Image: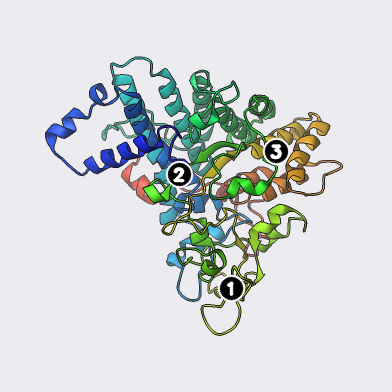
C-alpha cells in the first residue's frame, strides 16, 4: 500500500493532516497566508494539494456508498436485509438491487456528491495552479485535468446528462445547466487527449513507483479506451477503432504485464503488482484511506478464520450465478466462500444464532435474510497484520487485464482480427488456469469480463453495453426493468438546490 507516491508518502500525508486540521481554525491571519501565491511554491506543497483530489477518487474503490451504487443492480453483488436487523437501511440497498430506486434514494445522492467532490477539488487546484506565479506546472495541471476527466467519466456513466463545471466558484445567480451525455463524452475525450502530452509515462524507462497511484499517460489512454468502448451507449455512435488505438498505446508501452499469480493483485501488500495501471492507494494505519471489503463482506465468525483484529459485519454477498461462471480449476474461484465454514485450524465456525456450524447457502429471502444466506467473495485477501477495522490492500480501478479484454471486444465488434482477440482473451484465462478457448465470441468476452473483473466496477457498464442489465432473470423480480433504469436519477435534493438541472427521463 502507498498513500500517494512512494518517495514522498510521509511528507504528503503529514501535510494533508496538518492542512486539513487547519481548516477548522478560522484565524484570519493564518487563512490569509494560504493563497496560490504563497502555498504552491514547492513540489511538496503542490503534491499535497493534488493528494486531496486523489483521495476523493477513492469513492470508486473503497466499498463505500459510491462503490455500492455502481455495483448494486448487477448480477454480481447484493446487500440483503438481515433478519437480525442489520443492513436494512430503510430499504435503500434493496431498491438499488431491484431497480426500484427513486430520486429520493440517499445513497444515489451520496454517489452524486462523491463524484462532484472530485470535480470540485480538481477545479480548485487547477484554478490555484493557474493563479500561482510559479512557472513550470504544466505537468501538474495536465494531471488534474485528467483526474477531473475520469470523475466526469463516472458522472456520465451513472447519471448521463450532468452539468459541465470547470470553475471552482459558482455564481449563485448563474447556476450551471445540464449538459447532454454526448457533450460530457466529448469533454472527457478532449480533456484526456489534451492532458496526455504532459503526463508521465511508465513505459519509457521511468520508475513506475514514482507515479504509483497517479494518472500517467497509460492510465489516461486506458480511460480513453474504456470510454470509447462504451461510446455507442453514451453517444449513439460506436468508437471501436478509437478504443483499439487507445488500448494499443497501453499494451505497446511495455509498462505493464500480468503477474503469474492472479491473486497477487489482491494481497495486503499489492502495490508492486505490474498489472496496476491506476489504483486507489490506502494506508489505514496512518489515516490514509481504507479497504473495507473484508469488514463489510464476511460473516462475524470469519474473524477466526482469518485471525482478524475486528468482527466483520456480515453485509456484502455475491450472487450464486457469479460463482457458477468459473471452471473448478480456475484459481479465481478460490476467492468465494460457501458451504461449511471453518477457522484457521480447520475447526467449524459457529453461527451467531443457535447451535451448529456456519454453512453459507444461496440467497433465500433478501428482505429478511438469515445470517448464513449468500455466498461471500473475499477478493482482497485478509491479513492478520491489519490494524483496526480496515484492510490495507490497494484497489486497482484499472488493471492491464481489463485493457486486454477491452481491445479484444473492440476487435470483434469492429470486424477486426478474431485471432488477435482470441489471443488476448486467452492471455487472461490461462493466467488463472482456465481452459484456453479454441474460438472467441462476444459472449465469451462478456463472461470473461465477469469472471476477471468481478467487484471491480465494470459489470454495470458491461451489462448495459451487452443489453442484459434490464432483464429480470438474474434478479429477485419477475419483470424486466424499463429502459430509463440504465441511468440513475439526478437526486431530488440537487434538483431543488439548482432548478437549472434537468431530471433524467422516467423519473
Left or right, 68 with reference to 171: right
Q: Which mark is residue 134?
A: none
Q: Which mark is residue 405?
A: 3
Q: Residue at x 66, y 34 (%)?
A: 257
Query: Disc 1 designates what residue?
Result: 372
- Whole-percent x and y of residue 242? 65, 25
- In the image, residue 480 sits, relative to residue 278, either above or below, namely below
Specify the farthest residue to the bottom. 355
- Whole-percent x and y of residue 500? 36, 38
Residue 360 figure quarter: bottom right
Q: Residue at x 59, y 49 (%)?
A: 266
Left or right, 22 with reference to 369: left
Q: By what rule are the colours in the image chosen?
A: rainbow
Q: CA distance from mark 3 to mark 2?
A: 24 Å
- Looking at marks 3 and 2 on the same chain, the residue that comes earlier in the sequence is marked by 2
Could you say whether the residue bearing mark 2 is in a helix, strand or loop? helix
Q: CA distance from mark 2 to mark 1?
A: 30 Å
- Whole-percent x and y of residue 122? 38, 32
Left or right, 176 with reference to 233: left
Could you say whether the residue bearing mark 1 is in a helix, strand or loop? loop
Q: Residue at x 60, y 45 (%)?
A: 265
Counting the numbered discs, the total is 3
- Looking at marks 2 and 1 on the same chain, the residue that comes earlier in the sequence is marked by 2
Q: Which mark is residue 58?
A: 2
Amino acid at each position: 500500500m502507498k498513500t500517494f507516491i512512494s518517495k514522498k508518502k510521509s511528507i504528503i500525508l503529514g501535510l494533508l493532516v496538518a492542512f486539513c486540521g487547519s481548516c477548522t481554525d478560522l484565524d484570519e491571519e493564518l487563512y490569509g497566508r494560504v493563497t496560490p501565491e504563497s502555498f504552491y511554491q514547492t513540489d511538496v506543497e503542490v503534491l499535497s494539494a493534488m493528494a486531496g483530489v486523489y483521495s476523493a477518487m477513492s469513492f470508486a474503490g473503497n466499498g463505500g456508498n459510491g462503490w455500492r451504487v455502481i455495483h448494486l443492480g448487477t448480477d454480481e453483488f447484493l446487500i440483503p436485509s438481515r433478519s437480525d436487523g442489520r443492513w436494512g437501511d430503510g430499504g435503500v440497498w434493496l431498491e438499488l438491487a431491484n431497480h426500484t430506486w427513486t430520486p429520493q434514494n440517499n445513497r444515489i445522492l451520496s454517489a452524486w456528491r462523491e463524484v462532484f467532490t472530485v470535480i470540485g477539488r480538481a477545479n480548485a487546484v487547477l484554478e490555484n495552479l493557474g493563479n500561482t506565479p510559479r512557472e513550470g506546472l504544466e505537468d501538474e495541471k495536465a494531471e488534474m485535468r485528467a483526474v477531473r476527466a475520469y470523475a466526469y467519466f463516472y458522472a456520465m456513466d451513472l447519471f448521463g446528462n450532468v452539468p459541465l463545471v470547470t470553475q471552482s466558484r459558482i455564481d449563485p445567480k448563474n447556476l450551471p445547466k445540464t449538459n447532454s451525455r454526448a457533450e460530457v463524452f466529448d469533454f472527457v475525450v478532449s480533456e484526456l487527449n489534451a492532458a496526455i502530452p504532459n503526463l508521465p509515462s511508465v513505459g519509457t524507462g521511468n520508475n513506475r513507483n514514482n507515479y504509483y497511484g497517479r494518472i500517467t499517460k497509460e492510465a489516461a489512454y486506458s480511460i480513453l479506451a474504456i470510454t470509447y468502448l462504451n461510446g455507442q451507449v453514451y453517444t449513439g455512435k460506436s468508437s471501436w477503432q478509437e478504443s483499439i488505438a487507445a488500448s494499443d498505446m497501453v499494451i505497446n508501452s511495455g509498462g505493464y504485464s500480468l503477474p503469474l499469480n492472479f491473486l497477487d493483485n489482491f494481497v495486503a501488500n499489492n502495490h508492486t503488482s505490474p498489472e496496476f495501471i491506476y489504483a486507489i492507494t490506502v494506508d489505514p494505519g496512518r489515516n490514509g484511506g481504507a479497504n473495507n471489503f473484508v469488514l463489510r463482506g464476511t460473516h462475524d465468525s470469519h474473524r477466526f478464520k482469518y485471525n482478524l483484529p475486528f468482527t466483520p459485519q456480515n453485509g456484502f454477498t455475491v450472487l450464486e450465478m457469479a460463482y457458477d461462471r468459473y471452471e473448478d480449476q480456475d484459481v479465481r474461484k478460490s476467492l468465494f466462500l460457501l458451504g461449511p465454514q471453518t477457522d484457521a485450524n480447520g475447526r467449524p465456525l459457529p453461527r451467531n444464532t443457535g447451535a451448529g456450524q456456519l454453512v453459507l447457502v444461496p440467497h433465500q429471502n433478501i428482505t429478511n435474510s438469515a445470517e448464513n444466506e449468500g455466498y461471500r467473495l473475499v477478493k482482497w485477501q485478509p491479513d492478520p497484520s491489519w490494524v483496526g477495522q480496515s484492510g490495507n490492500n490497494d484497489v486497482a480501478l484499472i488493471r492491464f487485464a481489463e485493457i486486454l479484454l477491452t481491445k479484444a471486444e473492440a476487435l470483434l465488434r469492429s470486424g477486426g482480427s478474431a485471432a488477435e482477440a482470441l489471443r488476448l482473451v486467452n492471455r487472461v484465462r490461462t493466467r488463472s488456469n482456465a481452459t484456453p478457448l479454441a474460438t472467441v465470441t462476444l459472449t465469451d468476452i462478456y463472461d470473461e469480463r465477469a469472471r476477471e473483473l468481478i467487484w471491480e466496477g465494470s459489470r454495470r457498464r458491461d451489462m448495459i453495453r451487452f443489453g442484459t442489465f434490464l432483464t429480470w432473470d438474474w434478479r429477485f423480480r419477475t419483470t424486466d426493468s424499463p429502459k430509463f433504469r440504465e441511468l440513475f436519477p439526478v437526486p431530488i435534493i440537487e434538483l431543488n438546490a439548482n432548478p437549472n438541472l434537468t431530471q433524467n427521463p422516467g423519473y
